[in-house]
Image (cartoon, rainbow, N blue to C red):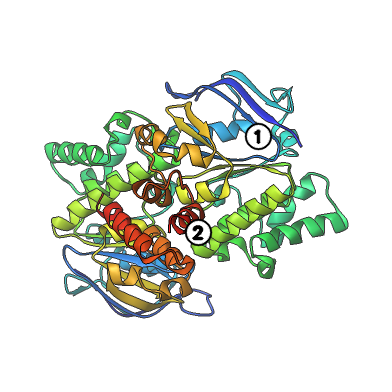
């Protein structure tokens, strides 16, 4: 399983004067679950598009297991890094759910039983196995988003990159996304996800990377990034710690970024 | 005032209606939250309210929709657009695509409504300022992030100062600060007498801005009442809707069974968070 690294990456969009990434260095170890948070326009989406080669650094370097990705084409990187877009309709094109999910692994050369099991597994993981023959556009927006996730899961890449995976999902949909991340983690895969949902971030990730104006301004486990000592940094980037962290601080229970950690601290305290 | 009278809507080719016998009144100055599991009918209700279904999205509508007491059935989509503003979760579907700058994008609506030049400038600057995106005024909309585009689309809507507003997950791509700015802007519009319907998965947001919350289940109204009652209702979970964080934490704590003193402290802390 490969490590991912960005070294002093700067990105300036062709027609823009803004440095969307302004010197980002980040190393993600194999098997880590990393959440990327930050204000709208802080560079999160730009950052993750460098991970699979959709965007190339204006300066700096992106490497996969120590190997510079600059000479690799997107199609080659796709074997290692699967990226799910924020808007599924930028991704979906096939006439049936099964055909949509099959496209990626087929392009990677999977055939026969391996292909069938990759597709079945991915559809089951997102709860769409009964919809294999459905036209993607007959699914509601939230299930289309789960379909886009399945089509990347089926490629069985060692690294999964998700851009706001819980947006537009109801409670069950969020639980499905959490389940997908847990399962990928159990298999040793790396997960990098952008999110504005701090409860999801605190509950499903080992590490939180905070971005502001194209730079990384915070990086650590949820218990430290959401601890009271970091709140000033968070608020300066227009973020708020999850409710459990805020309540734990009010009750003097220390850093309790998740519901579970708050409730156990509460029970321990009497 | 926006009124739905026994509204049933079936998309062309669909086996079942997506809305069934929905009756609702959204009074002037009222912010009504709409919750429900995916595919419970929230988006359909928004499309019907704004007149996009069946005018542009094919299907069959039964029942009546009234704006300030007048049946909208005879109105064209353009006539309706002047009366009801609508925003979607995906801002890309909403931006005009013709404006070269954010400023032009936000000014586009009031210009089309034929306001004077000074009125258009006032409205545009106020709308940009309300969502703190004045610094994006000269940027190209297509080059902004998804969240920034959502703020631009919402600004464009605010500049119209609509008396009726229908919002389908208007903060889906926003950071917490952007979400709060949108909430404040909606509260100001309601104070000016607007009737606002807002579909959201973020029940914490609804708890802070809504007077009333309606829960849909398979196209029907399952719950309708004061926001604090509906959002604290145990049946919400069965409807596939996440309770606000404060409600969720209180019920988790209750089940875990710390002492009564600890629970009282928790209640105090949650109450302080609610007003913070």
Q: Is residue A257 left or right of residue A132?
A: left
Residue B6 lies, with reference to residue B35, above or below; the image says: below
Q: Residues within 10 Å of mark 2 (few under 14, many from 20)?
A: many
Residue A106 lies, with reference to residue B65, above or below; the image says: above
Q: Position of residue A263 (x, y in %)?
A: 47, 57
Name the quadrant containing residue A212: top left
Q: Nearer the viewer, residue A243 or A132?
A: A243
Residue positioned most to the top: A59
Q: Position of residue B255 (x, y in %)?
A: 47, 69
Name the quadrant containing residue A238: top left
Pointers 2 and 1 within a single chain: yes
Name the disc covering residue A169, or none.
Answer: 2
Residue B230 lies, with reference to residue B113, above or below; the image says: below
Q: Nearer the viewer, residue B98 or A69?
A: A69
Q: Residue at x 51, y 56 (%)?
A: A260
Q: Is residue A8 left or right of residue B112?
A: right
Q: Give SS at disc 2.
A: loop
Q: CA distance from mark 2 to mark 1?
A: 25 Å
- In the picture, the quarter occupied by the N terminus of chain B is bottom left
In the rendered image, which residue does mark 1 sit on? A52
Residue B25 lies, with reference to residue A46, above or below; the image says: below
Name the quadrant containing residue A191: top right
Q: Is residue A160 left or right of residue A118?
A: left
Q: Chain of mark 2?
A: A
Q: Position of residue B119 (x, y in %)?
A: 13, 41
Q: Residue at x 52, y 76 (%)?
A: B14
Q: Which of the two marks, 2 or 1, is nearer to us in this view?
A: 2
**Lower sequence index among marks 2 and 1:** 1
Q: Is residue B135 left or right of residue A237?
A: left
Q: Give SS at disc 1.
A: loop
Q: Residues within 10 Å of mark 1 (few under 14, many from 20)?
A: many
């Amino acid at each position: 399983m490969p490590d991912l690294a960005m070294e002093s990456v700067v990105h300036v969009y062709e027609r823009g004067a803004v440095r969307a990434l302004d010197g980002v260095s980040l190393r993600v170890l194999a098997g880590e679950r990393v959440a990327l948070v930050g204000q709208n326009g802080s560079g999160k989406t730009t950052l993750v598009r460098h991970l699979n080669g959709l965007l190339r650094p204006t300066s700096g370097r992106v490497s996969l297991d120590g190997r510079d990705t600059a000479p690799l084409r997107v199609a080659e990187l796709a074997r290692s890094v699967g990226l799910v877009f924020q808007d599924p309709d930028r991704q979906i094109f096939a006439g049936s759910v099964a055909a949509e999910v099959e496209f990626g692994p087929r392009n990677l050369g999977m055939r026969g039983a391996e292909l069938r099991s990759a597709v079945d597994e991915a559809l089951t993981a997102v709860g769409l196995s009964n919809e294999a023959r459905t036209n993607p556009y007959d699914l509601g927006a939230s299930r289309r988003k789960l379909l886009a996730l399945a089509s990347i899961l089926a490629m069985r890449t060692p690294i999964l990159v998700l851009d706001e995976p819980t947006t537009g999902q109801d409670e069950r949909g969020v639980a499905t996304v959490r389940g997908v991340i847990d399962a990928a983690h159990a298999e040793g895969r790396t997960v990098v996800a952008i999110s504005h949902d701090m409860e999801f971030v605190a509950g499903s990730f080992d590490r939180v990377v905070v971005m502001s104006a194209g730079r990384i301004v915070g990086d650590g486990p949820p218990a430290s990034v959401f601890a009271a000592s970091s709140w000033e940094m968070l608020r300066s980037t227009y973020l708020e710690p999850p409710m459990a962290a805020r309540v734990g601080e009010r009750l003097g229970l220390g850093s309790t970024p998740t519901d579970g950690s708050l409730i156990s601290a509460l029970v321990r305290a009497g | 005032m926006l009124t739905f009278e026994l509204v049933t809507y079936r998309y062309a080719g669909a086996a079942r209606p997506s809305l069934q016998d929905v009756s609702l009144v959204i009074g002037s100055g009222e912010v009504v939250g709409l919750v429900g599991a995916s595919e419970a009918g929230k988006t359909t209700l928004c499309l019907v309210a704004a007149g996009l279904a069946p005018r542009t999205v094919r299907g069959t509508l039964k029942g009546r929709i009234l704006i300030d007491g007048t049946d909208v059935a005879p109105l064209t989509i353009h006539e309706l657009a002047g009366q009801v503003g609508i925003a979607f979760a995906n801002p890309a579907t909403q931006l005009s695509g013709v404006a070269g700058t954010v400023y032009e994008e936000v000014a586009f609506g009031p210009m089309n409504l034929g306001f004077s030049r000074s009125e258009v400038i006032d409205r545009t600057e106020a709308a940009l300022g309300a969502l703190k995106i004045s610094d994006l005024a000269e940027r190209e909309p297509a080059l902004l992030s998804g969240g920034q585009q959502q703020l631009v689309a919402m600004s464009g809507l605010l500049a119209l100062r609509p008396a009726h507003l229908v919002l389908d997950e208007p903060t889906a791509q926003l950071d917490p600060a952007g979400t709060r700015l949108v909430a404040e802007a909606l509260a100001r519009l309601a104070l000016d007498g607007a009737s606002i319907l807002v579909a959201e998965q973020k029940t914490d947001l609804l708890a802070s801005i809504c007077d009333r919350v309606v829960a849909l289940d398979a196209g029907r109204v399952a719950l309708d009442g004061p926001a604090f009652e509906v959002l604290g209702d145990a049946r919400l979970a069965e409807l596939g809707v996440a309770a606000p964080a404060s409600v969720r934490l209180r019920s988790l704590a209750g089940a875990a069974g710390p002492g009564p003193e600890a629970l009282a402290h928790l209640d105090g802390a949650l109450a302080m968070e609610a007003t913070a």
